[in-house]
Image (spheres, rainbow, N blue to C red):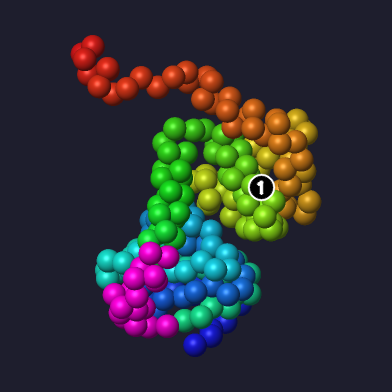
């Protein structure tokens, strides 16, 4: 069954994660973890046409503490989660396809966790722009026209900090800003900015070696 949502509408929340599975046909959806105390958000996944949610509940049959929001007018193909789980059990081809898809999403979460733990805001933003620029070369840049608040949620920051970083990038000729939207215009400098943090830190010593010295 097809369903539609207006831009800014909540599609599903933790309580709905065991009810339905959505295949995104049109528009963009952000999958968000929120702090109920201060309202801060972290966008775990930014999804486009061809993506599905909630894949975590699809696999383990448990509620998932995330919320799906429509960033554009959104259209999905919606079906009961129990029916999708049964389809996985019945079809080896579908299982392999879902496992490949999950592998890609796990890789994205791993990259996000590493960025949050290891890099400063400017480096995280540079990596984000680079990753989506590569996708944009294939016609799939999901960052187009996103406001700075949404970019901040994608890298675990806040809008005011991201605004300062983008202003510095614009001053250095790395990006252009058009009505709030960001366009990378100097990839060499963007790559250099992303790699500068690694150069400052130097090689990471294996944990076992550090233990041996202790």
Asked if the stretch drawn in magenta spans residue 94, the answer is yes
- Residue located at (54% from left, 68% from top): 50
Q: Position of residue 167 (x, y in %)?
A: 71, 38
Q: Position of residue 10 (x, y in %)?
A: 50, 73
Q: Secondary structure at mark 1?
A: helix
Asked if the stretch drawn in magenta spans residue 67, the answer is no
- Snapshot quadrant of residue 7: bottom right
Q: Which residues are magenta?
A: 79-97
Residue sitting at the far top: 213
The correct choice, above or below, for 192 with respect to 159 in the image is: above
Q: Position of residue 37 (x, y in %)?
A: 38, 56
User: Is residue 17 toward the left or the right of residue 47 in the image?
Assistant: left
- Snapshot quadrant of residue 27: bottom right
In-front residue for pair 112/164: 112
- Residue located at (54% from left, 39% from top): 124
Residue sitting at the far front: 93
- Residue located at (58% from left, 68% from top): 49
Quick one: quadrant of the C terminus?
A: top left
Residue 167 appears in the figure: no
In-front residue for pair 133/123: 133
User: Is residue 20 toward the left or the right of residue 155 in the image?
Assistant: left
Residue sitting at the far bottom: 1
Instruction: From the image, tell me which residue sits under label 1.
Output: 133
């Amino acid at each position: 069954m097809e369903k539609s949502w207006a831009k800014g509408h909540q599609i599903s929340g933790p309580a709905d994660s065991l009810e339905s599975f959505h295949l995104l046909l049109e528009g963009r959806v952000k999958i968000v973890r929120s702090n109920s105390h201060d309202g801060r958000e972290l966008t775990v996944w930014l999804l486009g046409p061809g993506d599905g949610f909630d894949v975590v509940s699809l696999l383990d049959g448990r509620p998932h503490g995330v919320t799906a929001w429509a960033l554009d007018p959104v259209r999905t193909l919606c079906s009961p989660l129990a029916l999708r789980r049964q389809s996985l059990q019945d079809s080896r081809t579908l299982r392999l396809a879902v496992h490949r898809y999950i592998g890609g999403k796990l890789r994205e979460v791993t990259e996000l966790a590493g960025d949050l733990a290891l890099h400063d805001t400017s480096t995280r933003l540079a990596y984000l722009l680079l990753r989506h620029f590569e996708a944009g070369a294939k016609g799939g840049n999901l960052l187009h026209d996103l406001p700075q608040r949404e970019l901040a949620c994608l890298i675990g920051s806040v809008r005011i900090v991201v605004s300062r970083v983008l202003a510095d990038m614009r001053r250095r000729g790395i990006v252009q800003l058009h009505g709030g939207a960001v366009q990378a215009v100097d990839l060499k400098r963007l790559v250099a900015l992303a790699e500068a943090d690694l150069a400052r830190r130097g090689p990471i010593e294996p944990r076992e070696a550090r233990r041996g010295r202790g």
